[in-house]
Amino acid sequence: MALQKAIELENGIVTNYHRIVSLNKITNHANIIEIASYVNDGKRKEEETALKKGQETGEAVPMNVFIDTKYISKEYNENETIQDAYSYLKTLEQFKDAQDI
């Protein structure tokens, strides 16, 4: 799953594809959502292909993929799932009206 929404970064780059990379739970303190944003889903697929090939060959595979990473800290919830985290992101102004893809 991922979210689709055009978001212009401060540097002028427009990202359209946003996925949760990790959901970290700091017990009784906070949940931290790591989000990677890409220019489009094709660049995410390019990254996946390069990483898979690198794992198979044991060598770094070059790729030309821009990734903007953000961390969002929220209240602790030991039962929060990735789906819950995506739903939460869509309540934030930055991801308001984003489409599930």
Image (tube, helix red, strand yellow):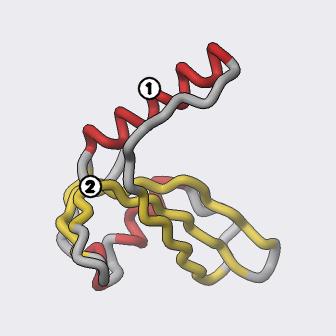
- Tell me the quadrant of the picture where the N terminus can be found: top left
Q: Is residue 100 left or right of residue 89?
A: left
- Crowdedness of circle 2 by 10 Å Cα count: few (<14), some, many (20+)? many
Q: Is residue 89 left or right of residue 51?
A: left
Disc 2 residue type?
A: Val
User: Which is nearer the eye, 8 or 58?
Assistant: 58
Residue pictured at 42% horizontal, 57% vertical: 67
Q: Which mark is residue 39?
A: 2
Identify residue for label 1.
49
Q: Is residue 36 above or below residue 56?
A: below
Disc 1 residue type?
A: Thr
Residue 98, x across and y down, in percent: 22, 65
For the residues marked 2 and 1, what is the alpha-carbon distance in whole angstroms?
16 Å
Residue pictured at 25% horizontal, 69% vertical: 13
Q: Is residue 9 above or below residue 62?
A: below
Q: Is residue 98 left or right of residue 2?
A: left
Residue pictured at 31% horizontal, 42% vertical: 43
